[in-house]
């Protein structure tokens, strides 16, 4: 996905969310759910069945309990970066549950040339959404299963539902 006008500045809050499923019979040891360009500035990978968040070239969950990914099952993944407030933080939310959080300065702005989806992945990605602004986990969880109207959703700057009818209607 070309980032262009979707990009954020280092002081902007943003939310990137999507549904993803790797095939149960997939054999790759390493797949990328999402990544910015090819420079490891921000990547969410699955390495031998475990989620790995890499930001600015550093694996952020290496000191945490490994985050298990179940092949053959749809998972909702959300990276919520809150730059404002008393404690700026990022939160990785998997299937509605916060699985990793840390200081927001560990995660770069959503900027670059491309947002890559599903590199080396056998499976599917659906409902990719990029939001500018502040979001709380309860609102993210409440809207996991809802389709968005891109013209009515405040702060929604990128919406990719991956169905032909959407592209026929809006592009």
Image: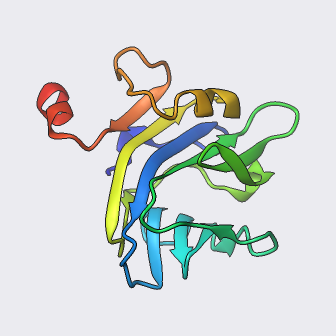
Residue 109, percent across and down? 59, 49
Is residue 104 depicted above or below 48 in this figure?
A: above
> What residue is at 63 percent from the left and 73 percent from the top?
57
Q: Give the residue at the far top of this rendering.
A: 152
Residue under the image location 64 percent in, 30 percent down: 135
**Residue drawn 37% across the image and 60% down it:** 117
**In the depicted structure, whether residue 66 falls above or below residue 162:** below
Residue 3 percent location from the top left of the image: 38, 48
Residue 54 in percent (x, y) is at 62, 68
In-image side of 44 versus 28 (left or right): right
Against 23, is 116 above or below? above
Residue 118, visible in the rendered structure: yes
Using the image as rendered, state which of residue 94 and residue 35 is in the foreground.
Answer: 94
Looking at the picture, tell me which residue is in the foreground, 37 or 90. Answer: 90
Q: Residue furthest right?
A: 86
Which percent across, then down, holds residue 41?
56, 65
Q: Is residue 98 left or right of residue 13?
A: right
The quadrant in which residue 66 appears is bottom right
Q: Nearer the viewer, residue 160 or 115?
A: 160
From where the camera sits, is residue 91 visible?
Answer: no
Picture quadrant of residue 100: bottom right
x 62%, y 70%: residue: 52
């Amino acid at each position: 996905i070309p980032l262009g006008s979707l990009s954020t500045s280092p002081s902007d809050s943003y939310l990137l969310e999507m549904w993803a499923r790797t095939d149960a019979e997939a054999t790759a040891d390493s797949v990328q759910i999402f990544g910015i360009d090819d420079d490891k500035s921000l990547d969410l990978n699955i390495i031998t069945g475990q989620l790995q968040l890499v930001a600015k070239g550093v694996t952020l969950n290496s000191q945490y309990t490994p985050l298990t990914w179940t092949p053959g099952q749809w998972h909702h993944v959300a990276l919520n970066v809150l730059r404002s407030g008393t404690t700026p933080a990022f939160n990785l939310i998997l299937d509605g549950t916060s699985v990793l959080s840390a200081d927001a300065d560990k995660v770069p702005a959503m900027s670059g040339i491309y947002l890559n989806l599903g590199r080396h992945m056998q499976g599917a990605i659906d409902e990719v959404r990029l939001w500018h602004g502040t979001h709380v986990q309860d609102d993210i969880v409440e809207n996991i299963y809802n389709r968005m109207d891109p013209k009515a959703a405040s702060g929604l700057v990128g919406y990719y539902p991956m169905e032909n009818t959407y592209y026929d209607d809006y592009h």
